[in-house]
Image (cartoon, rainbow, N blue to C red):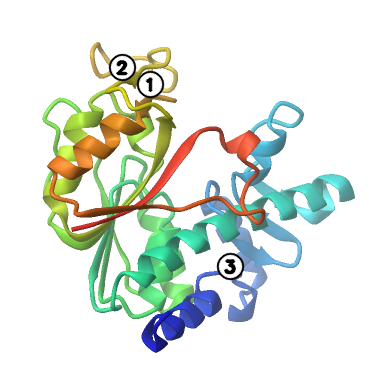
Amino acid sequence: MTAHARSLRLRFLLLTFMDLRPFALTREQVLHGAQLLDYQPFILADDVQTGIGYDWLYGPQDPGRYVAFREQVSSEVWERFSTANAQLRNMYDDWIEAVCHYTTGNESVLDVACNSGYFLQAFARNGYPQCVGYDLLDKTEVFAYLNGILGTDARFIHERYDSWTHQLPGCQPADVVIASAILLHLSDPLYFLYFLGSVTKKVLFLFTRVIRAPEYVIYYHEPNEYYKDDPFPVCFDNNNYISTGLLQLSLRKLGFREVIELQPTESWIPQQVMGTKGVLVCLK
């Protein structure tokens, strides 16, 4: 590892862990954050955390809990919630560090399904000058909240990728593109990969469900799981799989010269919960 890479690694180890306690939030800010943040793993205070990690691990026992207040849950649930979302943060931070390894810190960053902006805030905090996120959910207030606390300037655009046109309206190319847990929700995966290739200048980070097979296969789950009114054929909105053979072929044809697959570690969400996923850093 070069000295530059080691320096970047140290920076990211210090600045990607989304523990907001060092920012001395007021209780009003903590409670406001608990209302805004959900899916992504933030620590707001000693007694308030958010994140979907707990739901992934224990959802059948206690479904739908994305926010936990220590005084409102048992000590067992609090410990499980904290541990599960620490694993989710570890996983996210390892992904960010991997992207950092292949960039200089001067690049623009685009997240095409950004949710609350965990990834964008991490890059913005580390000096990446232009961090822009899109999502079908309106996260405008969340971005303003985190920008105000962290002193960042990440930008949110309330727009969704359109599977009819295979475009994200108004989206501009960026050096670094993040597509985490979105391909598995789309009915047009090959067109979406083409779109990603068209907006990625240097590095694409891709996280999605895969089938470990050399054949060129796409497997669709039941339609309209989330969005009951979406018509055929754009109604396959969850848990779709693409074979590793087809994914690798697609990335090569889109001009990615190298594809690095990140391997899970013991500090991540357990693989028996995560299922079969591909975590890829794709270089042009």
State which tag comes first along the sequence, 2 or 3: 3
User: Does the CB distance between marks 2 and 3 fall below 8 Å?
Assistant: no
Q: Looking at numbered disc 3 in the image, what kind of residue is underneath it? A: Gln
Residue sitting at the far right: 75
Of labels 2 and 3, the one closer to you: 2
Where is residue 198 shown, x and y percent of the image?
11, 48
**Element under label 2?**
loop
Where is residue 65 shown, x and y percent of the image?
66, 39
> Which residue is the site of mark 3?
29
Where is residue 94 shown, x and y percent of the image?
51, 62
User: Does the CB distance between marks 3 and 1 fall below 8 Å?
Assistant: no
Instruction: Tell whether 1 sits left or right of 155.
Output: right
Of labels 3 and 1, the one closer to you: 1
Report the Cα–Cα distance between label 3 and label 1: 32 Å
Q: Looking at numbered disc 2 in the image, what kind of residue is underneath it? A: Cys
Report the Cα–Cα distance between label 2 and label 1: 7 Å
Query: Measured along the vertical axis of the image, is residue 263 above or below residue 1?
Result: above
Residue under the image location 83 percent in, 54 percent down = 71
> Which residue is the site of mark 1?
227
Nearer to me, 214 or 128: 214
> Which residue is the site of mark 2?
235
Nearer to me, 158 or 210: 210
User: Does the CB distance between marks 2 and 1 fall below 8 Å?
Assistant: yes
Residue under the image location 70 percent in, 59 percent down = 48
Q: Quadrant of residue 43?
A: bottom right
| Label 2 Cα crowd, 10 Å radius (few <14 / some 14-19 / many 20+) | many
Report the Cα–Cα distance between label 2 and label 3: 38 Å
Residue under the image location 41 percent in, 77 percent down = 125
State which tag comes first along the sequence, 2 or 1: 1
Where is residue 257 shown, x and y percent of the image?
19, 54
Q: Quadrant of the N terminus?
A: bottom left
Nearer to me, 168 or 91: 91
